[in-house]
Amino acid sequence: MEQVFARCFAAEFRTRLCGGAREPLYQPAGEGSQVHLLWYREDYFASALHEVAHWCIAGEQRRQQLDFGYWYAPDGRSPEQQGAFEAVEYKPQALEWFFSLACGYRFRLSADNLGMPGGEMPDASEFRGRVCEQARYWQRSGLPARAGVFYRELCREFANEVGVNDLHFSEEQLL
């Protein structure tokens, strides 16, 4: 995965994808480094795809900030915090879905809040709908530029010739 990302973005964007992190993190270049680092968790394939999705969406200003300037509340978020999380998370998850399909890898929606107060699982139906709607939107209108580059390179790397318009997105796939 790191090599695919490097072929696409290392030269133009001076950004490197790195595995082995305890938690995902984006580190913009700074003191002593001319390279931006995009860390994904351990060696988890899905984490790499997800962090690349965040990077593909982040604009120039966001890419100059630690972790793209986003807040992150750990597991155990309140319903209000979960809603705020989902409001910024549906687009990266929609892109991750494209990337997973390019690799022939099963995408799993992540509400990422297993320790919600009261012990109940959050109702992900609205979130699932937003992710699916966003994926269909990008299928119709085209992927963001960097995401399109990465999608095509993943297809080449994984010998997958499926075009974006040939993909199928349904909420049932996210159950």
Image (cartoon, rainbow, N blue to C red):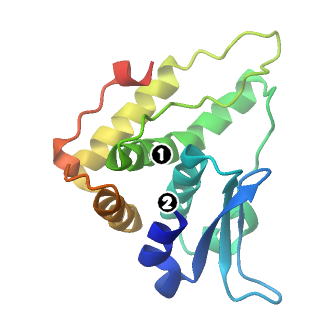
Q: Position of residue 121 (x, y in %)?
A: 68, 14
Q: What element carries label 2?
A: helix
Q: Where is residue 135 in the image (x, y as percent from the top left)?
A: 34, 41
| Residue identifier under label 1 | 91
What's the residue type where badge 2 is placed?
Ile
**As drawn, is 137 to the left or to the right of 37?**
left
Residue at horizontal 49 percent and vertical 87 percent from the top? 11
| Residue identifier under label 2 | 57
Task: Give whichever of 133, 3 is nearer the camera.
Answer: 3
Sequence-earlier tag: 2 or 1: 2
**As drawn, is 125 to the left or to the right of 110?**
left
Could you tell me how many numbered marks the image carries?
A: 2
Q: Quadrant of residue 175?
A: top left
Residue at horizontal 74 percent and vertical 32 percent from the top? 81
Q: Is mark 1 on a helix, strand or loop?
A: helix
Does the CB distance between marks 2 and 1 fall below 8 Å? yes
Residue at horizontal 59 percent and vertical 55 percent from the top? 51
Query: Would you call the spot at circle 1 few (<14 residues within 10 Å), some (14-19), or many (20 or more)?
Result: many
- Give the farthest residue toward the left: 166
Task: Give whichever of 128, 98 is nearer the camera.
Answer: 98
Q: In which quarter of the image is residue 118?
A: top right
What's the residue type where badge 1 is placed?
Lys
